[in-house]
Amino acid sequence: MDTVNGGISFWYADQSAGAPREPLAGDASADVCIVGGGYTGLWTAYYLKKAAPFLRITVLEQKFCGYGASGRNGGWLYNGIAGRDRYAARHGKEAAVRLQEAMNATVDEVIRVAAEEGVDADVHHGGVLEVAYTPAQLARLKSFHDAELSYGEKDRLLLGARETAERIRIAGAVGSSWTPHGARIHPVKLVTGLARVVEELGVVIHESTPVTEIRPKHAVTPYGTVRAPYVLRCTEGFTAALKGEKRTWLPMNSSMIATEPLSEEQWSRIGWEGRETLGDMAHAYMYAQRTADGRIALGGRGVPYRYGSRTDNDGRTQPSTIAALREILIRFFPSLAGVRVDHAWSGVLGVPRDWCATVTLDRSTGLGWAGGYVGSGVATANLAGRTLRDLVQQDSGQAGPTPLTDLPWVDHRVRKWEPEPFRWIGVQGLYAAYRAADRREASSNAATSDWMARYADKLSGR
Ligand SMILES: Cc1cc2nc3c(=O)[nH]c(=O)nc-3n(C[C@H](O)[C@H](O)[C@H](O)COP(=O)(O)OP(=O)(O)OC[C@H]3O[C@@H](n4cnc5c(N)ncnc54)[C@H](O)[C@@H]3O)c2cc1C
């Protein structure tokens, strides 16, 4: 069987997006209009409607709920948030520790709500295992581990080569760091389940309804305009296509492959009984999960960025990226040399110029947004949804400030990306440097990060 390329993602191979919802049929009004039917938009709708059932909430989605990264991701529901160190530098360590604690709690919150609302998303709460397989990676792993402890993670474990192999037998792994604050999920089951739940609560969702322009109190579409005191932009990696937002968040690609289901014998060679989500410490890192139906789904960067902030065509990725991801899979698990790759796909995630996720409500205009999660959005989108709820409630006088509205990522502003061709040249250069650094680290015994990666980090503002 040939590898299926695109079709949004493998997660749709055994799940349909459901019956299409009606597009907007003309001008309309709402109390809150949410643009984008991914995790961010749907969690925001969920928490707002739960807090204030009388609110008229409309979600406008250009294709269908889960069309974006929420229907394509690696299924790492974990406590990472982009920009934490920068928020610590700007607002103090104590504020960043509060942000981290909120993220730790968010993993449990998603699992709790999914169970309570009857959304079966194949959740397995096995934590996150991040491995090193070169001396330089091991040095980075140890400082990463220490940094996580310094942000209050008391339950994280540093594991040696033998303890790592007791969990997952990865060729050449010299150590790992494990945290319980992570779970494996099926991305599409979560996003389609959430859409069903918010609709049952009375939220109106219009699909096949692209918003062409957002301005104060207006979301403009080809079929009509929704007027609302609050318009919340939850469009992540697609934001650049909106009028006036071309250079706001760079749409970074991430690509994945899913193997055929592995046999019992293949699994017995690998281990992975704990079903931890799995990552590494390479500069151009990989991420993977053991799926509920016994496959390995594995992702990485591939071609990082398309000129002019273009996005992919319904999830198709480049053949060279499929080959590169397969190579990583076999490097990790040589016993899978003959394994079939059933599916490959890609998606976009939003990267702000300073690589810091944010959630904001502009009180003078009623415009809000959340995103820029840089690849750590599965859990963060939930925290964003609860925070947007609190910001809207505070602004409309229904509630006061809350611990969430006081977190350091709230109301963060950042400058725009450079115009083309500088944007394209910068991102290509960044990932060329990361890949070269990974290759040099793999062939050396140096226990420090390669200078090319350090230099690239500095130049890119990462
Ligand atoms: C391949 C891949 C793997 C990833 N793996 C992980 C992972 O394992 N763990 C993790 O934490 N994060 C991961 N991420 C990131 C994570 O999936 C995202 O951060 C998260 O899903 C963002 O959710 P969202 O709702 O903000 O954006 P999206 O899911 O992208 O949703 C945005 C929605 O807005 C709609 N939209 C956009 N523009 C318009 C418009 N003009 N009008 C109407 N609708 C519009 C889109 O169609 C889309 O449905 C991954 C991302 C990718 C691409």
Image (spheres, rainbow, N blue to C red):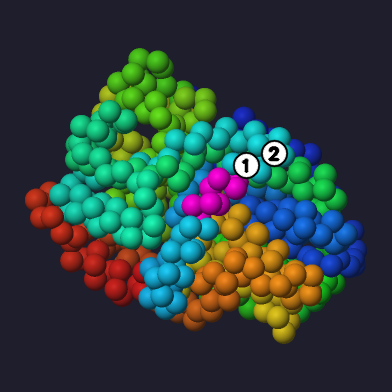
Residue placed most toward the observer, 222 or 380: 380
Q: Secondary structure at mark 1?
A: helix
Tell me which amino acid carries mark 1.
Answer: Arg
191 relative to 92, above or below: above
Q: In x, y percent, where is residue 286?
A: 36, 46
Residue at (82% x, 44% y) in the render: 200
Q: Is residue 181 visible?
A: yes
Span highlighted in magenta in the image = 103-110
User: Residue 319 colored magenta?
Assistant: no
Label drawn at residue 425: none
Residue at (86% x, 66% y) in the render: 30
**Mainly helix, strand or loop, the magenta region?**
helix
Tell me which amino acid carries mark 2.
Answer: Glu
Residue at (54% x, 76% y) in the render: 412
- View extreme (top): residue: 265
Quadrant containing the C terminus in the rendered view:
bottom left
Label drawn at residue 112: 1
Which image quarter: residue 222?
A: bottom right
Q: Is mark 2 within 8 Å of ligand 1?
A: no
Q: Is mark 1 within 8 Å of ligand 1?
A: no
312 relative to 433, above or below: above
CB under 8 Å between discs 1 and 2: yes
Position of residue 376 in the picture relative to residue 67 (left or right)? left
State which image quarter holds ligand 1: bottom right
Which image quarter: residue 119?
A: top right
Position of residue 313 in the picture relative to residue 214 (left or right)? left
- Disc 2 crowd rating (10 Å Cα; few below 14, some 14-19, many 20+) is few
Label drawn at residue 116: 2
